Structure formats: structure tokens, C-alpha cells
Image (cartoon, helix red, strand yellow):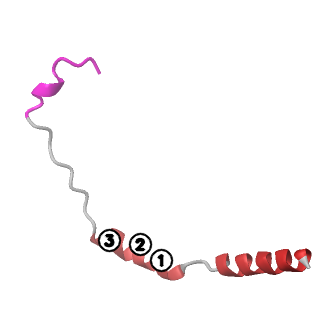
Amino acid sequence: MRRLAALLGTIFLVACTAGDHEDLREWMKTAAQDTKAKIPPLAGGRALRGCAL
């Protein structure tokens, strides 16, 4: 009985994770097209003068 339950549980998990999530990939593609990177410039650059990078 335990083996049957384990087998059915395994089949259920495999069936749930077998999809390739095409709708999620489509959404990510359209979201990436509308997004622009917004990186603010450094404030004056004086804060880094003492650092030895």
C-alpha cells in the first residue's frame, strides 16, 4: 500500500511540473521590452576620492 501511494505521489508531482510555462515566458519577454534601466549618476564623485579602487 505504501509503494502504491509513493508511486501515485511521484506521478502526480511529475505531472504538475511537466509544463514548460509558455505563458510565463511570454510575459517576461513583453515585460523586458517595456523596461528601461534607470541608473542615477553618482553625486559629484567626491565621495570616492579617498578610496583606492
In the displayed structure, would residue 50 be above or below residue 44? above
Residue matched to label 1: 24
Residue 33, label in figure: 3
Q: Nearer the viewer, mark 3 or mark 1?
A: 1
User: Where is residue 41 drawn, in percent x and y?
Assistant: 14, 43
Q: CA distance from mark 2 to mark 1?
A: 6 Å
Earlier in the chain: of badge 2 and badge 3, it is 2
Near mark 3 (Cα within 10 A), the count class, few <14, some 14-19 or many ≥20, is few
Residue under the point 28% across and 72% down: 34
For residue 10, what is the image quadrant? bottom right
Pointers 3 and 1 in contact (C-beta within 8 Å): no
Q: Secondary structure at mark 2?
A: helix
> As shown in the figure, which amino acid type bears the numbered disc 1?
Leu
User: Where is residue 1 drawn, in percent x and y?
Assistant: 91, 79
User: Where is residue 19 drawn, in percent x and y?
Assistant: 63, 80
- What kind of secondary structure does the magenta stretch mostly adopt? loop
Pointers 2 and 1 in contact (C-beta within 8 Å): yes
Q: CA distance from mark 3 to mark 1?
A: 14 Å
Residue matched to label 2: 28
Relative side of 14 to 43, left or right: right
User: Where is residue 7 drawn, in percent x and y?
Assistant: 85, 77
Relative side of 7 to 52, left or right: right
Q: Which residues are magenta?
A: 44-53
> As shown in the figure, which amino acid type bears the numbered disc 2?
Met
Q: CA distance from mark 2 to mark 3?
A: 9 Å
Q: Secondary structure at mark 1?
A: helix
